[in-house]
Image (tube, rainbow, N blue to C red):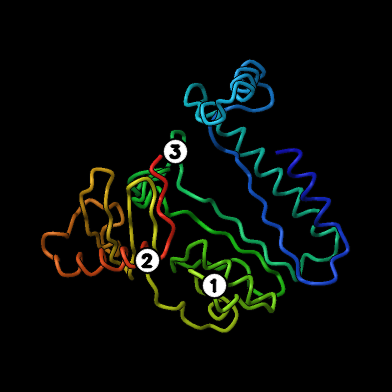
């Protein structure tokens, strides 16, 4: 985290004569649950990496605690603070858009109530995460929106704000939110698509189609059942079939998901 932050601070402070993008990916808080003072665990993980067991090194589910989780969150917070401070010193703060979000819901030491599920699942606890947007010159602060968006939308948004267009031969999966953020337009109606390790999900409005790891299809109305406890598949079979077909249509345009 320290090295990554230092490089980010250096990049932000450069002389930029045109729109620029910094994609900063932190891996904390995350397993293995350790901080810089965990010398023994760190040495064990380093040995596994040297032996070629990179995945085994990353997937350490042993150890950790709520206190360790707190330390890792504080480390993340301090690192983001250093980057934002560098942005302020550079004189670019007012007209730089900063987006902060997680790639998935929490695990083990996280608190997701009232959502069900967590990381590596496509229930809301695994995919519904807050997004924080900061752009002093463009968007008023202290606003809260409950409109669902997902990561591909930010690709389209940043391209539009930077004055660029996607190549017509490679259409984007997401939709630009620039109109919503700057001109009061509604977010474009579209389906939100997810897949991971045999699980699948597609959201259209408040309706969500979900297939679990056992291959069972479910239908939930997130407008009344955010915890996903009342399966509506039996009473709305036509809608379930429609959303399943929509998911399969999108999936057919993508590379096959790796078997392992």
Residue at 80% in and 50% down: 9
- Which residue matches tag 3? 107
In this view of the protein, which residue sits in the foreground, 217 or 189? 217
Does dot 3 land on a helix, a strand or a loop?
loop
Residue 153 point in image, percent of width and height? 52, 68
Front of the two marks 3 and 1: 1
Between residue 234 and residue 181, name the one nearer to us: 234
Residue at 28% in and 66% down:
207
Label 2 near label 1: C-beta < 8 Å? Answer: no
Q: Looking at the rendered structure, which numbered label has been put on residue 159?
A: none
Q: Is mark 2 on a helix, strand or loop?
A: helix
Residue 52, given in percent of the width and then of the height, sits at: 59, 25
Q: Where is residue 238 in the image (x, y as percent from the top left)?
A: 15, 69
Residue pointed to by mark 2: 250
In the image, farthest residue toward the top = 40
Q: Mark 2 or mark 1, which is nearer the start of the sequence?
A: 1
Q: In which quarter of the image is the C terminus?
A: top left
The answer to whether 250 is drawn above or below residue 31 in the figure is: below
Query: In the rendered image of this protein, does residue 5 appear above or below residue 88?
Result: above
Disc 1 versus disc 2: distance between alpha carbons? 15 Å
Which badge, 3 or 2, comes first in the chain's sequence? 3
Of labels 3 and 1, earlier in sequence is 3
Label 3 Cα neighbours within 10 Å, binned few <14 / some 14-19 / many ≥20: some
Rounded to the nearest whole Å, what is the CA distance between mark 3 and mark 1?
A: 35 Å
Measure how far apart labels 3 and 2 are at the Cα level. 28 Å
Residue that badge 1 annotates: 170
Residue closer to the observer: 45 or 154: 45
Question: How crowded is the residue under tag 1: few (<14 C-alpha within 10 Å), some, or many (20+)?
Answer: few
Other-residue count near label 2 (Cα within 10 Å), few / some / many at <14 / 14–19 / ≥20? some
Picture coordinates of residue 234, whole percent (x, y): 11, 59
Name above or below for residue 146 compared with residue 130.
below
Secondary structure category for the residue under label 1: loop
């Amino acid at each position: 985290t320290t090295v990554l932050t230092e490089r980010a601070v250096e990049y932000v402070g450069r002389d930029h004569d045109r729109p620029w993008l910094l994609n900063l990916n932190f891996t904390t808080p995350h397993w293995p649950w350790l901080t810089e003072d965990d010398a023994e665990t760190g040495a064990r993980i380093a040995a596994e990496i040297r032996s070629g067991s990179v995945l085994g090194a990353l997937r350490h589910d042993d150890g950790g605690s709520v206190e360790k989780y707190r330390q890792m969150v504080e480390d993340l917070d301090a690192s983001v603070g250093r980057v934002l401070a560098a942005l302020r010193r550079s004189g670019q703060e007012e007209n730089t858009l900063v987006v902060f979000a997680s790639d998935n819901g929490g695990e083990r030491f996280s608190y997701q109530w009232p959502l069900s599920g967590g990381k590596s699942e496509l229930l809301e606890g695994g995919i519904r995460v807050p997004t924080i947007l900061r752009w002093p010159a463009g968007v008023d602060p202290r606003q809260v929106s409950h409109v669902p968006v997902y990561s591909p939308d930010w690709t389209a948004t940043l391209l539009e704000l930077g004055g660029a267009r996607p190549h017509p031969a490679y259409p984007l999966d997401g939709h630009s939110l620039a109109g919503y953020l700057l001109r009061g337009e509604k977010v474009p109606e579209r389906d939100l698509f997810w897949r991971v390790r045999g699980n699948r999900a597609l959201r259209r409005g408040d309706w969500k189609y979900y297939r679990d790891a056992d291959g069972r299809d479910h239908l939930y109305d997130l407008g009344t059942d955010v915890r996903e406890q009342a399966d509506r598949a039996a009473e709305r079979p036509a809608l379930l079939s429609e959303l399943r077909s929509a998911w399969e249509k999108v999936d057919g345009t993508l590379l096959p998901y790796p078997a392992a």
